[in-house]
Amino acid sequence: MNPLPPKGLIVALITPLNGENRVDWESLRGLIERVVSYCNALMVGEGLFGEGFSLPNPLRLELLQGSAEMIWGKKPLFLCPTAGTTEETVDNILLLTKALKNYPDQDSLFWVDTPLWYHSNRKLPQFYREWQEYTPYPILLHNNPVLIGKRNCTLKRTNIRTAVLKKLAENEQIVGLIQAGDLKRTFHYQRAVRARRDFRFYDGDEGNFLNSPSSSGVVSGGANLLPSEWSQIVTASSEMSEDPAQNLLLLKQSQKLRDLCRVLQENPAQRLKAALHRLGWIQFAKGIDFAQETYPKGEEGLIDFLRAHFSLQTPP
């Protein structure tokens, strides 16, 4: 039996960079320390908040291995090895499996793969059956049509087909799905995997979770900024308090998180980094695809949010 990933709050960590576009390890360590007590697992190298698909592959491997050294033993670790081609993705898995094989508590590591970034739906179940030859660690699939839509190539589909997911769920090494698509497709996916009673089904869209929480939990980038608030909401989604005052507090927290979702919607990595830099939590606000800016131009919503919730003065 493969170990199951934890339910609850999964924080998709941003990737802080220094002035030379290398990983800013000091900032990353500080960020991990701020969120680790609030979450159930940490995700590294994710394609949207973590900018994983924009990072050069050698830098991404450095990020994944270095983060594992920081996080191992503190919380379960979700590593994202997805690359631009099938061959490169497999190479990443082989290299990381070898690098991490002597770490203790091997049951705390899970791959998160976004297959449609480099592979079509065709023969996808067969491809994942071959993973058993490459690595012993369980797999979480990531379905994110918005992210796939940013790929600079013509694809027939931006979603994993429901019939394909049903076949994928027969592979016991695949233990869950992070679903960031529309709710109608989510219902179809849930029916497709119902034969797997322990199959994890995470919301990959924070707004969807706030509207209709999934039973397994949520992958949150906003928790880089508001880990305590996200932790409270995720915990409350499984058991509502009978205390009216507590419920009112959670309602206010929920509205704060909805506001943050709207602020981050267009350029989540850039806006999160700008906010974290302004708060002094990371040294630089830059990313691979954007230059350093304390506040991205035209981001009045971000400015207003930070002023309202972190008592910051209006920037010049």
Image: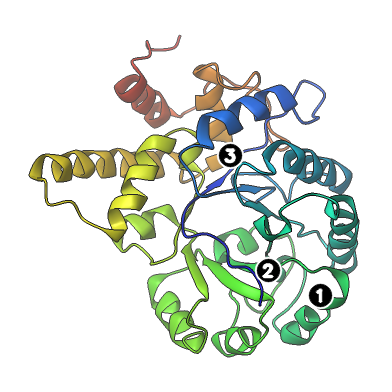
Contact, mark 1 vs mark 2 (Cβ under 8 Å): yes
Tell me the amino acid under the disc marked 2. Ile
Q: How much space separates mark 1 and mark 3, taking CA atoms? A: 30 Å
Question: In front: 28, or 172?
Answer: 172
Tell me the amino acid under the disc marked 3. Ala
Residue under pointer 2: 139
Q: Which mark is residue 131?
A: 1
Q: Mark 1: which secondary structure?
A: helix
Residue at figure coordinates x 83%, y 51% from the top left: 100
Tell me the amino acid under the disc marked 1. Trp
Residue 248 horizontal/vertical position (percent): 14, 42
Q: Mark 3: which secondary structure?
A: helix
Count of picture labels: 3
Residue 53 horizontal/vertical position (percent): 73, 51
Q: Mark 2: which secondary structure?
A: strand
Residue at figure coordinates x 48%, y 81% from the top left: 189
| Residue count near mark 3 (Cα–Cα under 10 Å), binned few <14, some 14–19, many ≥20 | many
Residue under pointer 3: 269
Residue at figure coordinates x 35%, y 38% from the top left: 229
